[in-house]
Image: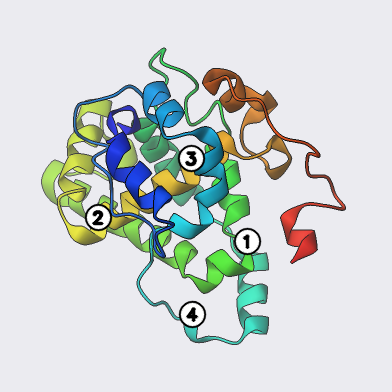
Amino acid sequence: MLKAAAKNNLRTKLDKNASSKPAFVGALASGLNRRAFLQQSSIALLAGNLFACKPTSPTSESASNSPQKIASHAQHFSFNKQQKLTLDQVQMQLFPADGDGPSAQDINALDYLQWALTDRDNAADGDDEYIVKGIGWLDGLSEQTQGAVFIKLEQQKQHQILERISQSSAGENWLSLLIYYLIEALVFDPFYGGNTNQIGWQWLQHQPGFPRPDVRTHYRHLT
C-alpha cells in the first residue's frame, strides 16, 4: 500500500517543515512504486525532517502527566502478543514483501516501533495509546464486517478493511502514524533497531553520513 503514496503531497509538507505530520497521503491508492516515492522525496530530506512532520495524535492521558510520569510510562510500555501480531500484519500490508524492495519485516519495523514508543517525546504525544486504540478500532470493524478479528482474515480481506479504515479521519491519521514509523525504520541508522543490515539504505542507494551514532552519541543520550 505504501508504494502508492503520493510523493508530491508529502514532499510539499516536508519542504515547508510542517509543524504536524501530514494527513495520510494516499497510501491505498494506485501510483508510484515505493522506491520511486522515497527516492524522489529525497532520503536526506525525509530523515532530516521526519520529526517536524509527524502526524499529531489526539490529546491523551499521557500528555497531561508530568515529565517524570511520561518518562516512566514510556520506559515500561510494550505491546501485548495480540497487538504485536496485528501490527505486524498491518505493517506488512503497508510495506509488503512484493519484490519491490524490503518488506516491513525485512526492516524490523515492528521491533523498531516498539523501541520508538519508549521515547518520552513520543509518549508525551500519546502515540503509544493512539496506536493501541487504533488496533481496537481495526478489530472492531473486522469483527463487525467479517466476523473475525483482523489477524484471522485472509490478506485481501485485510486490505479491504484497511481501505475502509482509511476513509475516516481517525483511521487515516492512525495509518499515517504507522507509515511515519515505517519510514523511520527504513531510513534511520540501524543502531536504532530498524533498517536491518542497512537494507533500506541499500535499496534506496543512499550513502549515510558520518559519524554514525553509537552508545555515546545517539540522540537519546544527547537529549
Q: Earlier in the sequence, mark 3 or mark 2?
A: 2
Q: From mark 1 to mark 3, how far is it between C-alphas?
A: 17 Å
Judge the density around disc 4: few (<14), some (14-19), many (≥20) Cα neighbours within 10 Å: some
Q: Closer to the camera: disc 4 or disc 3?
A: 3
Q: Nearer the viewer, residue 223 or 140?
A: 223
Q: Is residue 89 left or right of residue 108?
A: left
Q: Which residue is mark 3?
A: 183
Tell me the residue that label 4 is attached to: 63
> As displayed, is residue 41 above or below residue 78?
above
Residue topped by disc 2: 171
Marks 4 and 1, how far apart at CA:
14 Å
In this rendering, position of residue 129 left or right of residue 13: right
Q: Residue at x 21, y 46 (%)?
A: 142
Q: Looking at the picture, how far across and down is residue 219, in whole percent? A: 73, 56
> What residue sits right under mark 1 in the picture?
118
Circle 1 sits in a helix, a strand or a loop, which is it? loop
Q: Amino acid at mark 1?
A: Thr
Q: Look at the numbered disc 3 and give the secondary structure of its residue.
A: helix
Residue 47, percent from left and from top: 56, 43
Sequence-earlier tag: 1 or 2: 1
> Spatial distance from mark 4 to mark 2, Cα to Cα?
21 Å
**Tag 4 and tag 2, C-beta contact below 8 Å:** no
Front: mark 1 or 3: 3
Find numbered disc 4 in the image and state the secondary structure of the residue it sits on.
helix
Among the two numbered marks 4 and 2 on one chain, the one whose residue lies closer to the N terminus:
4
Q: CA distance from mark 1 to mark 2?
A: 23 Å
First-in-chain label (4 vs 3):
4
Q: CA distance from mark 3 to mark 2?
A: 18 Å
For badge 3, the amino acid type reads Ile
Location of the N terminus by quadrant is top left
